[in-house]
Image (spheres, coloured by chain):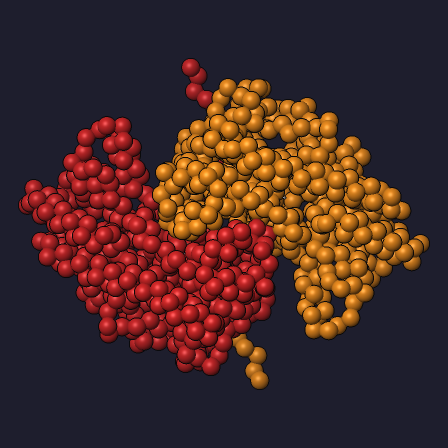
Chain colours: A red, B orange
């Protein structure tokens, strides 16, 4: 048979897209999917099924959604069941329907339902304890935080001389979208030994280096709490980052999707908005939030918002709104879930104690389980020979450092693979655990890591998997002494 | 007070985004929103509220969603209500949950749930009556057709020498996204007098002209049924377009979101896929479908799919899937609704007659109302002096031609506005009817049009509005004799 002549080959298409990599769903996870398929077809592996620790996807492990929220969404979709719902659910459904009608199947306004954006404005004001309340025109609802971040990169990055300062290690969405936009990554390294801190001197040094290379730093990305690193920034760090951005006249993207996921007593969430208002500096900050994380955990519904937290040029403001219209609107179920995330049932609303109690109980149980799991994972990793892990202060991941011997590195080179990739592939093939190689998040040259989520449920299963990991690691590594 | 110095102004951002225009939500609709606000605040207008005919958004006029579909989605979100649903709903919920678990709050596989993609493959095979059945790896679920189209433009368009052949008039998503990608529009004019036909000679001429201007035509966009034009292509037209694309080695985007919206006896929907299979030519075709239109009408839920309908280079295939992973997955409610759209309840599935009857009744009522409304609008427009409208064979819009006198055109020029924009703004201010100027869709130079949807309900209200339009138009135009 002749070779088919395709009119379009990879060389004919957008090279920025070809170059972009997204490790969370990269080689290791795709190998895992193949293995799962093989197991289904009868092939034998030393485990029964794969365990997906590659992606922060709580409900795959049976994490339950908050039932109050779900009852409301269900009733908005099918009003005929409203009679079977509690009075408190009915009242909230009425509240939304008074504003938007039973019309969740209609396109909404492009920036999203005003009723939800109003609820978010109240939430932000209360969270930050500020006199100022956000204007709803500064809040845009998005299909997950990813969509907001992507839109803003596409809009703000002008050409291939523009650069984005990203923390290393970073969440791979950033490197992927910057590459797709044809812009430049400017890495700033978080200092692992100091609990993944962001250092002023490092920001300065990388900024200067970029400038010298003819790159214009345009955006500083701050992920707080950190993914994959799990640190929570203290106020001093945030002040430094804002001062830096203000001085250099660069924009801040504050990725605050894990704001509810803080597990340590001595840290609390401080928003970039709050600090910026206190400092009263001239600086442009966009903040991103999501229903995928926190205790809401509704990844699949794709909801979230972006907030223009400080004054921006009105013409730029207009361009943001205009660009949002092209995709018509973000999905209405995700919009409503975003509203629900920031509007718990309360007495003032008229809810009865039972509703409030059940809601709080569900949230508390979920949160404290996450907190325990963060501790379990940190402890096991640090007890594993040749592995060390900074405290998981927040978010949903561990990003342990693994010591790899020269012999191992040589072994990997012979396979033409990154050492951490070889490590993760072997971990997968021998235990079924799917984790993401540190190189997917970028890491300090010569260091090796992987990222795993802390999301396995029930907790005994997590314990069991951590034991499997510990044993595997020590045996595996002993072969490369 | 000093003027604030913003670090980012419009000249610093992506000029392609700045240039992009999206008329469906452009000047006229935004003026309408302002008027609506003014009315709320007590300002007097010669109408009580605005009537949004600018956007194909059926549920804003009270179009009911299909209840079977909604009951299933609601039960997936809140399984506690499942007991109150019919057996047939319960069975279908079980079918989905057996495949994906009660996990719609989890990220799905990036291309979407396999169970839904399998259902789509069956639907396509049956619709086209082909021996071949699509492979589910060639089907990707998207947040509305918009997301699929946008992804594919971003991926396939390489640089500012690449061009896309778009029908004029076109759906403004196309011009907007092509501009955002920094690529070139290559217009091919549909021939209004021949019912908005696509002519081989025109395709050839525009192709050559683009080539002479140093542009490489890469993609041919075909919208069938047409938006805003409402025509349905016959087989001969489709054959010609495919032959043209095959000869020139350019890719076809077949926008088939209105495939269920065909109102005339003598036309039926023929997919580009079906014709391509018959012709057996070497050509690459991507087809897009959506839950927003048809009789499903679920715009707000954002669901749809793209199909790689013909063989493409495996490396390009890989890049499509990889690019899709960056946004994690499309929203799961939209995914399920896409599955529901292509899987009506049947006897084979075990459904009882009542369920099937009710479902069919809802669909039939909705369809025949749309059909009647298409006829009402066409008739009224053609009875209006100085207005002519091609038959609305399909989709949801009329795109009438309006004759504007020299005096009127002069009048518009004095206001520094396109004549059709002035016309639409005055129509809005004097009647509350919101329609989109033809210039937003592009139109043959020297001709003027506007687009209005046929979606008003109940039908008496549509009749009343059409009368208002007719009277307004004739009075208004008489001033510019
Ligand atoms: C730091 C960070 N930002 C953004 C996202 C995007 O999440 P989503 O698009 O689901 O809101 C994630 C998801 O894992 C994340 O970890
Ligand atoms: C021709 C055409 N294509 C695509 C779309 C996009 O629709 P959606 O993104 O809601 O699926 C529309 C919406 O009006 C349309 O008219």
Relative placement, left or right, of A106 versus A19 is: right
The part of the image, by quadrant, that contains residue B376 is: top right
Percent position of residue B324, x then y: 43, 43
Q: As rendered, which of B314 and A80 lies closer to the eye?
A: A80
Relative placement, left or right, of A37 versus B11 is: left
Q: Residue at x 17, y 41 (%)?
A: A431
Q: Is residue A98 visible?
A: yes
Q: Residue at x 85, y 59 (%)?
A: B411
Q: Is residue A196 visible?
A: no
Percent position of residue A70, x then y: 43, 56
Using the image, determine if residue B442 lies above or below residue A212: above
Percent position of residue B30, x then y: 67, 61
Q: As rendered, which of B308 and B252 lies closer to the eye?
A: B308
Outermost residue, bottom direction? B1
Outermost residue, top direction? A1
Relative placement, left or right, of B260 versus A470 is: right
Percent position of residue B291, x then y: 56, 42
The N terminus of chain B is located in which quarter?
bottom right
Q: Residue at x 40, y 76 (%)?
A: A128
The C terminus of chain B is located in which quarter?
bottom right
- Number of numbered discs on residues: 0
Q: Residue at x 7, y 42 (%)?
A: A479
């Amino acid at each position: 048979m002749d070779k088919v002549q395709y009119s379009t080959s990879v060389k004919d298409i957008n090279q920025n897209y070809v170059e972009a990599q997204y490790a969370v769903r990269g080689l290791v996870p795709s190998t895992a999917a193949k293995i799962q398929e093989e197991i289904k077809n009868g092939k034998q592996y030393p485990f029964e099924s794969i365990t997906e620790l590659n992606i922060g996807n709580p409900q795959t492990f049976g994490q339950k959604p908050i039932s109050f929220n779900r009852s409301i969404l269900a009733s908005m979709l099918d009003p005929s069941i409203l009679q079977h719902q509690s009075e408190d659910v009915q009242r909230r459904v009425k509240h939304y329907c008074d504003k938007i009608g039973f019309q969740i199947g209609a396109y909404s306004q492009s920036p999203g339902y005003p009723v939800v954006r109003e609820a978010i404005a109240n939430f932000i004001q209360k969270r930050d304890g500020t006199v100022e309340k956000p204007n709803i025109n500064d809040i845009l609802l998005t299909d997950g935080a990813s969509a907001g971040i992507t839109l803003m990169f596409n809009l703000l990055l002008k050409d291939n001389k523009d650069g984005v300062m990203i923390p290393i290690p970073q969440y791979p969405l950033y490197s992927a979208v910057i590459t797709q936009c044809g812009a430049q990554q400017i890495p700033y390294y978080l200092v692992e030994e100091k609990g993944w801190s962001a250092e002023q001197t490092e920001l300065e040094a990388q900024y200067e280096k970029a400038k010298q290379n003819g790159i214009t730093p345009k955006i500083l990305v701050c992920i707080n709490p950190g993914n994959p690193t799990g640190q929570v920034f203290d106020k001093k760090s945030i002040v430094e980052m804002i001062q830096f951005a203000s001085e250099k006249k660069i924009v801040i993207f504050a990725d605050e999707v894990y704001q509810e996921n803080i597990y340590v007593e001595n840290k609390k969430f401080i928003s970039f908005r709050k600090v910026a208002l206190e400092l009263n500096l001239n600086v442009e900050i966009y903040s991103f939030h999501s229903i995928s994380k926190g205790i809401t955990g509704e990844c699949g519904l794709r909801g979230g918002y972006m907030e223009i937290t400080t004054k921006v040029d009105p013409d730029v403001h207009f361009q943001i709104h205009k660009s949002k219209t092209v995709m018509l609107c973000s999905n209405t179920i995700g919009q409503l879930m975003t509203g629900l995330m920031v509007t718990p049932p309360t007495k003032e609303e008229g809810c009865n104690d039972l509703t409030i109690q059940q809601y709080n109980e569900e949230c508390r149980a979920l949160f404290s389980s996450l907190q325990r799991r963060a501790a379990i994972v940190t402890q096991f990793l640090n007890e594993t020979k040749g592995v060390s892990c900074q405290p998981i202060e927040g978010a949903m991941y561990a990003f342990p450092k693994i010591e790899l011997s020269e012999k191992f590195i040589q072994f990997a080179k012979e396979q033409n693979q990154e050492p951490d990739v070889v490590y993760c592939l072997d971990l997968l093939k021998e235990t079924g655990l799917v984790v993401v190689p540190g190189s997917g998040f970028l890491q300090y040259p010569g260091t090796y890591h992987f990222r795993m989520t802390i999301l396995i449920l029930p907790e005994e299963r997590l314990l069991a998997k951590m034991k499997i990991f510990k044993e595997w690691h020590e045996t595996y590594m002993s072969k490369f002494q």
